C-alpha cells in the first residue's frame, strides 16, 4: 500500500470544538473500516488532511496525528498517523465525539 497525505492550510484550532475537558480519548480503528480501496497496492491513495492536532500517536509515539475528514474514499472522520499509518477515533471523557462537525 502506498499512501500520500497532502496537508491543507487550516490550523488545528479551526477544526477543534471547545469542551470542558480538553483531553481526548483515542481508540484505534481498523484502516479498512474507515478508508476505501486501502488494499489496492498498484494505486496510490490520496487523503486530504486538515492539519496536525496536538495529540501524538499513541501507537508509535513519534508523530502528531493529522485530522482526516470524510471525503471520496474516507467513510469516517478520524485522526491519522502518517508515520505508522494508524487511524484513531477521538472522543471526550464524557463520551461526546470529538470529530463531529
Image: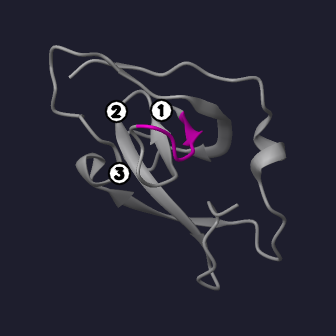
Mark 2 or 3, nearer chain start: 3
Left/right placement of residue 13 relative to residue 100 reads right
Q: Name above or below for residue 33 compared with residue 18.
A: above
**Residue underneath mark 2:** 84
Left/right placement of residue 31 relative to residue 90 reads left
Q: How far across and how far down the image is residue 97, in percent?
A: 60, 72
Between tags 3 and 1, which lies in front?
3
**Residue underneath mark 1:** 62
Left/right placement of residue 32 relative to residue 35 reads left
Q: Which residues are magenta?
A: 64-72
**Residue underneath mark 3:** 34
Between tags 2 and 3, which lies in front?
3
Q: Residue at coordinates 55% horizontally, 18% vertically from top-left?
A: 6
Q: Residue at coordinates 20% horizontally, 23% vertically from top-left?
A: 1
Q: Name above or below for residue 31 compared with residue 21.
A: above
Regarding mark 2 in the picture, which secondary structure is present there?
loop
Q: How far across and how far down the image is residue 34, in percent?
A: 35, 51
Q: Residue at coordinates 55% horizontally, 28% vertically from top-left?
A: 48
Return the mark for residue 9.
none
How far apart are the two marked residues, 2 and 1, measured between alpha carbons? 9 Å
Regarding mark 3 in the picture, which secondary structure is present there?
helix
Amino acid at each position: 500500500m502506498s499512501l500520500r497525505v497532502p496537508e491543507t492550510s487550516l490550523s488545528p484550532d479551526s477544526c477543534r470544538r471547545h469542551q470542558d475537558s480538553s483531553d481526548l480519548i483515542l481508540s484505534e480503528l481498523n484502516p479498512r473500516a474507515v478508508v476505501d480501496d486501502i488494499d489496492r497496492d498498484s494505486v496510490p491513495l490520496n487523503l486530504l488532511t486538515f492539519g496536525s492536532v496536538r495529540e501524538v500517536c499513541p501507537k508509535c509515539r513519534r508523530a502528531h496525528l493529522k485530522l482526516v475528514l470524510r471525503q471520496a474514499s474516507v467513510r469516517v472522520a478520524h485522526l491519522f498517523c502518517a508515520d505508522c499509518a494508524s487511524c484513531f477515533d477521538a472522543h471526550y471523557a464524557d463520551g461526546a465525539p470529538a470529530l463531529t462537525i
